Amino acid sequence: MMLIISFFSLSSAQDVPLPTPSTPAAAGEVASDAVDLTVQAAEDTVSFVQNLLARLTQPPQSDLARILLLVGGGLLLVVGWRIYDFVILVAGAVIGGIVAAALVPGDNGIIEIAAFLVGALIGAGLAVFFYYGAVLLIGAYVGVMLVTAFSFALGADGVSDIVVLLGALIGAIVMLSLSFEFLVVLSALVGAQLVVQAMGLNPIWVLLVAIVGAIIQFALVRAFRYEFRRRPRSLFRRAV
């Protein structure tokens, strides 16, 4: 995403007319202007990413969006094991909706909900057609949320971009390498994050709520003697 934003920023910067150097001094000014434009594009990119990360952890402005997050998060948190075959689909849809809503500027509730629905459709589509790609993206999202929660737990004022990037990378790798039954843990983590975000709680609650949700789910799995499969079932065959 950062590369794409940088590309468009630099492309727009290239449209700014620069004077044709006729003397060494003029050439130096042109070079200085080019450097300033490049630095400005980089700063705009970093600022955009930081604002996006901040919005991802903020509760939605619309009451309806909060209710949707709360209901969806509660279902994933407690009964994610019952939609075992669709955990990635549901998580992809929800996370896609959150990211899309975070990209919408302003506090217009209708636009926010529309963006959420469009993002949810895109996220669900990616989960269906690009299963492992969706797992990587969801893992990266969970990694970012956990890094944010840990930073709040330690009393830090903020999280550096490098730490956020490492958290996303580690989360993506771990999520891809986990056994398939740990999709239950994924549903608990995503569900906890949605509930905490909808209620506007401190991000540290994500860890506590996720642990409680995972315990409840595994207890229900054991009570109902549910057996996990090692391979994901095709969503198309499951739907049929």
Image (tube, rainbow, N blue to C red):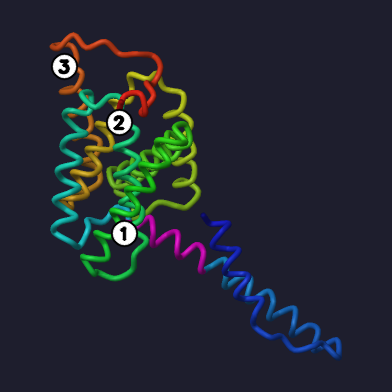
Amino acid at the residue labelled 1? Ala
Question: Does residue 202 appear in the picture of this structure?
Answer: yes
Q: Would you place residue 221 above or below residue 238 in this image?
A: above
> What element does badge 1 sit on?
helix
Which is more N-terminal, label 2 or label 3? 2
Q: Which residues are magenta?
A: 44-55
Kind of residue indicated by mark 2:
Val
Using the rendered image of the protein, determine whether residue 212 is visible from the camera's viewpoint: no
Q: CA distance from mark 3 to mark 2?
A: 18 Å
Q: Is residue 134 left or right of residue 12?
A: left
Residue holding disc 2: 87
Residue type pointed to by label 3: Ala
Vertical arrangement, residue 7 with respect to residue 25, above or below: above
The residue that mark 1 highlights is: 115
Q: Position of residue 55 (x, y in %)?
A: 32, 58
How far is the residue under mark 3 from the one under mark 1? 36 Å
Question: Mark 3 = which residue?
Answer: 219
In-front residue for pair 231/35: 231
Q: Is residue 54 magenta?
A: yes
Judged by depth in the image, the label closer to the viewer, 3 or 1, is 1
Extreme-right residue of the structure: 23
Percent position of residue 202, x then y:
21, 48
Q: Is residue 109 left or right of residue 13?
A: left
